[in-house]
Every structure is written in structure tokens, then in C-alpha cells.
Amino acid sequence: MMLEGRIALVTGGTRGIGLATARALAEAGATVVLTGRDEAKAKEAAAAAGAASGLALDVTDAKAVSTLVRGVAKEHGKLDIVVANAGIMEDALLGMIREELVDTTLSTNVAGTLHTVQAAARAMMRKKTGAIVVLASIVGEHGSAGQTVYAASKAAVANIARSAAKELGRSGIRVNAVAPGVIDTDLTSGLTEEAKAENIGKTPLGRLGTPEDVANAIRFLVSDDASFITGQVLGIDGGLVL
Ligand code: NAD
């Protein structure tokens, strides 16, 4: 029970990596609040993950993020762990990129992560301790054909972690990113069998990742076992070379 007594918040926790992370943190003893865009789904997911509560939150809404994070910290007396997981991915070749895709991707992945980290930092500052993890991607580190918008957004997410870590270290707050490879979730369910086989072929560990692979790494990063680790972008990709 390495996270006993800790208060944790996971955004986009209704499925996939967010749901697995909420479950992993709860199993490690943390009191977990998970959020989703839909309140009913968030409550259902919270029950399934052993989380304390499930709340509605759209991370593109800065004011809503700030209000919710402040509310969680107030209700539980503190906030120790925040996982800014909510994100979207839509592929488009350069010539096919619509302005709407740019807007939705950047407002969810970049601004949404920024709002969450900002609110988390404010809530953690009072106790001068805390751990934040954001969801970058192998695509953000190396680029990927047909994923220019998503790659740009995830490069930005990685640099939110690197920059916030520099700013918040003296306040006792650690900020890290995980950069998953191809993880088997709804986000990647559109991949053809051929595309999945191609990715597996390029992965030394010879399989796609599971949400639990990512959740276990996040649980480590927010625990005291990672107490001297900040500003890092940890690849969780089975060795995949893009
Ligand atoms: P998913 O689509 O299964 O889950 C994403 C979650 O984010 C959902 O709960 C969704 O409702 C939520 N969400 C989306 N927009 C939101 C918004 N505006 N406000 C609040 N919640 C919102 O995806 P996943 O595979 O579990 O991905 C989780 C994170 O990991 C994402 O940031 C994704 O970019 C990142 N990631 C995933 C992979 C992968 O291969 N699956 C690889 C690298 C990074």
C-alpha cells in the first residue's frame, strides 16, 4: 500500500489508461477521484476502479478545471497526486488537416494538460509536496506520418512536464511525463490488423502495450520510490522504434 493516505486525481478516467491508472492508484491505497466528460460514466468508472468518486469535467474548460481541483483539495484537505491523462488522437495527412482538428487537439491535449497542471500546482503549493504525471507519447518524441497535429500536441505536453518540473521543484512538487508507445485502448482501436502487426514487428518486446503497463509506471512515478525523479519523459513502449 505504497500510496496509503494520498489523495489522487485522474482526468479522463472513464476508460483505457486513465481507468487503469485510477485502479492502480486505488489498489496502492490512495483515495482516488476520477473525472470524465460524462458524469454518469465517471461515476460508473469510479465504482469499477475502486475510486472514491467520479466527477464530470471537460479539461478544455480552464475555469471548470480550476474549480474542480480546488474543490477536491478542499474536500480532502490536500491533493498529493494528479494525473493529467485526458487526451484525444485523430490522424490526418498534412494536406487533409482541418482547422477544427487543430483546435480540438490543441485545446484538449495542450491547453487541457496545462489547465490541469496549473490547478494541481496551485493546490499542492500550500503543502509544498506533490507529484504530477502528464500523458505524452512516443509520437511526440519522434514524430509520425499522418499524425503531425497529435505529435505536435504531445511534444508540447512533454515540455509542459519539463518546464513545470523546473518551476515547481523548489516547492517540493515533482512533474514527469510518460510517453506510451502503441497501447491497446479505444484510442488505437481504429488501427487495422496490418498496422498493429507492423507496430508489433517494430517492438522488441513483441506485443502492443496494455493500459496496465502504463498505469504501473505512473504508480511508480507518483510514489516515494521516485522521490528524486522530476522533469523526465519515460518511454513505455516495449522498445518500439518509430
Ligand atoms: P481513450 O480514448 O481510451 O481515453 C481517453 C480519455 O480521455 C477518455 O476517458 C475521454 O473521455 C477523455 N477525454 C477526452 N477529451 C476530454 C476532455 N476534453 N475532457 C475530459 N476528458 C476527456 O485513450 P487512452 O488510450 O486511454 O489515452 C489516454 C492518454 O494517453 C491520452 O492522453 C492519449 O493521448 C495518451 N496516449 C495513448 C496512447 C495509446 O496508444 N493508447 C499512446 C500514447 C499516449
Image (cartoon, rainbow, N blue to C red):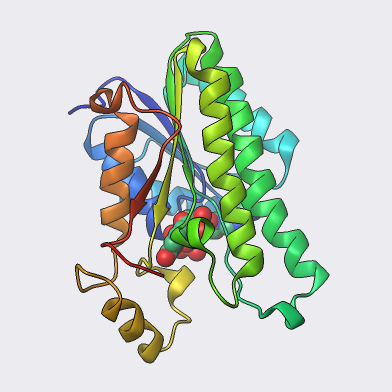
x and y percentages locating residue 130 in the rendered image: 43, 20
x and y percentages locating residue 156 in the rendered image: 62, 48
- Can residue 71 be seen in the rendering of this structure? no
x and y percentages locating residue 141 in the rendered image: 49, 56
In which quadrant is the C terminus drawn? bottom left
Query: What residue do we see at 35% from left, 52% from top?
Result: 235
Q: Would you say 40 lies left or right of 208 here?
A: right
Q: Would you say 183 lies left or right of 72 here?
A: left
Q: Would you say 134 lies left or right of 221 here?
A: right
Q: Is residue 110 above or below residue 95?
A: above
Query: What residue do we see at 44% from left, 59% from top?
Result: 138
- Can residue 160 be seen in the rendering of this structure? yes
Q: Would you say 120 lies left or right of 127 here?
A: right
Query: What residue do we see at 57% from left, 66% from top?
Result: 89
Query: What residue do we see at 61% from left, 63% from top?
Result: 150
Residue 74, image quadrant: top right
Q: How many marks?
A: 0
Residue 1, image quadrant: top left
Q: Nearer the viewer, residue 216 or 198?
A: 198
